[in-house]
Amino acid sequence: MMNPTRAPSNIATDHFSHAMRREIYEQPQAIAKTVDRHLQNDILFPGALHSIESALLTFEKLIIAASGSSRHAGLAGEIMIEDLSGVAVDVEYASEYCYRSTHAAVDPIVMVVTQSGETADTIAAQREALTRGVKTIAVSNVADATIPREASAALITGAGPELAVPATKSFTTQVTVLYLMALFLARKRGRMTSEVTRSYLHRLLQLPEAIDRNLRAWDDLAAQFADKQYHAEKFLYLGRGIHYAIAREGALKLKEISYAHAEGYPAGELKHGPNALVDEKLPVVVLATCDRHDPDSVLRYRRTLEVMKEVRSRHGRLVTVATEGDREITSISDDVFFVPAAPELLLPIVEVIPLQLFAYYVATKKGCNVDRPRNLVKAVVTE
């Protein structure tokens, strides 16, 4: 039987002036609890998907509908699921789903991802899917809410209550559930043996302790880096492959709590427009982690380094998230967050956390209310 490693808590003796920072520190426990909830005796989602078992045997495509940070979790989940299980995935904005054409010649399952379970656009998307006769799976941080109640099946995270408006532990636990879904579908479709699945789960189970071990160092570095950058009026975030989703999420986090303009882009798109923004005033935040055991990850990393050198040549200010032991990155980047080594598809869960802390410190140094940003609410209950 596999059980999640219980990460030691960094929060018991700490004082947090904001709920957001406390919830960032709660992520190791939230991730461990999420895995524990959905893995019993080596069985993924025991009983949770029984009501849609027949649909799981016949569906041709998975459509993920979500908004905000939950959509970014869906973008990461898209690559996890496609790469591991071979299932085709489309990610839709929940607010756009109802206006798209019907699923002609496709037999899909629609997965809706939500923090509150009450997001109006996501409720509308799910109801439209159900009206079309499509089975739905809800990934929600709140169990007793409209979306999981109305779904064909519901997968609840272990995030627990999240008081700050910005999504932190709700985001990483959603990505954790989507990773488990990728393994579940890979097993169900015969793409992965039980032994290989166990090895993937073992690496996931190691993450909470690894995150807990690094939180204080990331916190200190985030404060230092933010002190250099918080006067900037605009930021650019870059990532390739699955890390593009984290670039989007990092930019959103900074935008919503610091009120600086931030944009997440695929790293390879820099020359197709955004390069015009790069100068000595622009902080460019780059996801440059690497799984050295994965040739595709190494290739992605190498190409990302070339983009970073391009930014450097134009005097852009580089803040980078890289993998422990990377000596090459320090010669290119101004500031580096190092994260523990992990498989390519698990790196997003780890690398987003330094970006959450960076956004937190940029915002607090500007005097912003990070727990209650202006014009934002925790649950968007009107369309």
Image (spheres, rainbow, N blue to C red):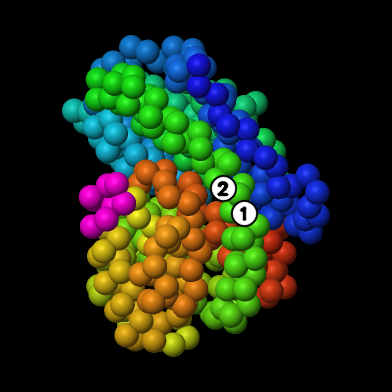
Q: Is residue 295 on the magenta stretch? A: yes
Q: Are discs 2 and 1 less than 8 Å apart at CB?
A: yes
The span from disc 2 to disc 1 (Cα, nearest Å) is 6 Å
Q: Toward which corner of the image does residue 4 lie, by quadrant?
A: top right
Please state the horizontal and vertical placement of residue 115, each as a whole percent of the image.
57, 40
* Residue 103 visible in the snapshot: no
Which residue occupies the foreground of this view, 42 or 314? 42
Q: Is residue 136 on the magenta stretch? A: no
Determine the residue positioned at 49% across, 55% down: 339
Which residue occupies the foreground of this view, 278 or 198? 198
Tell me: 195 left or right of 318: left
**Which residue carries the number 1 mark?**
215
**Which residue carries the number 2 mark?**
211
The residue type indicated by label 2 comes to: Ile
The residue type indicated by label 1 comes to: Leu
Which residue occupies the foreground of this view, 300 or 324? 324
Magenta stretch prevailing secondary structure: helix
Q: Residues within 10 Å of mark 1 (few under 14, many from 20)?
A: many
Please state the horizontal and vertical placement of residue 257, each as a whole percent of the image.
62, 64
Which residue occupies the foreground of this view, 335 or 377? 335
* Residue 38 visible in the snapshot: yes
- What are the residue bounds of the magenta stretch? 292-299
Determine the residue positioned at 38% across, 76% down: 332
Q: Toward which corner of the image does residue 20 lie, by quadrant?
A: bottom right
Please state the horizontal and vertical placement of residue 198, each as a whole percent of the image.
39, 25
- Say which element carries label 2: helix
